Image (spheres, grey):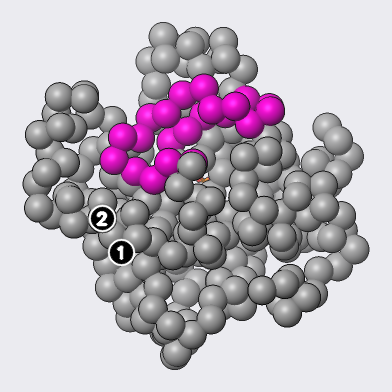
Amino acid sequence: QTVDQFMKMNEKEEELAKRLKLQLCRIIPGNLDDDPDVLDQLGIAAVEMFDELLPEGEFIVAVAGGSTMATMARHMTTNLSDNRKFTFVPSRGGLGEVMSIQANSVSDLMAQATGGENTALFAPDNLSAQALDSLKDEPTIRYTINMMKRANCLLYSIGNAKVMMERRRMSADEKERLNESEVVGEAFGCYFDEKGNITSRLSRFGLQMEDVEEIPYAIAIAGGELKAKAIKAYSHIAPDHTWLVTDEGAANSILKGD
Ligand code: F6P
């Protein structure tokens, strides 16, 4: 598929897509950091993009957590299922965040909104190696992990590293270790620096950054100037076929080269 077959980009979107080496970018007016209403616009645009990107057929959609993803879920409708059948699966277990924005909750919301299926992952994601070994052979957990590995679509967000460290209530030691490695962003529980080097991985059950390359349909949704550095850094590791929905707050900052 070539990008010309899809929605047209305006000049600034073209420039951003070129700068980040991504197949397609959509820029929503406003800056999420100054105006919380922009989150809904990001969610609406992400649903439009999802509808545009996916052909007819059956999809296993791996879904990350976070407030952006939860907002996207709220804007999904059964129309998306007119010619498609969805099974949503969380891209990982819980990582100590608020329940309503965990990947498990978001995938359940998406399944309910579209009339699709949901496969939950009932396990925390930051277990010791020993606990993980005994849990990963549990049939329900194994089933979900297999679904995750078979995903042919991925919906996820990118976070500002410092914001995510606070949100996950990390210890001072953990934060110090991450700050020493100069991380700027986070996605899938992987923290990365400005050049896109992954310096820390929190998630053991979940999808890893390397898995994204294999997933044919992938949309990242991230807005706000505070996320600009993270988005730019992530573009060094993002597969070229990634589609991005962002806002002017992040896009202008990236294009200015801040
Ligand atoms: O914790 C899940 C997650 O998707 C992170 O990987 C990402 O950094 C973050 O949420 C984004 O959260 P928000 O949409 O609330 O900014």
Amino acid type at mark 2: Asn
Classify mark 2: helix, strand or loop.
helix
Determine the residue positioned at 35% across, 35% down.
Answer: 203
Q: Which residue is mark 1?
A: 108
Left or right of 59? Residue 56 is right
Is residue 256 rendered to the left or right of residue 209? right
Residue 115 versus residue 242 in the image, above or below: below
Which numbered disc covers residue 146?
2
> Residue 173 at x, y = what percent?
41, 9
User: Magenta residues?
Assistant: 189-209
Q: Position of residue 205 (x, y in %)?
A: 29, 40
**230, above or below 65, in the image:** above
| Residue 19 placement (x, y as % from top left) | 82, 47
The kind of residue on which mark 1 rests is: Asp
Q: Quadrant of residue 202?
A: top left
Residue at image point 59% right, 23% down: 183
Magenta span has 172?
Answer: no
* Most foreground residue, 212 or 41: 212
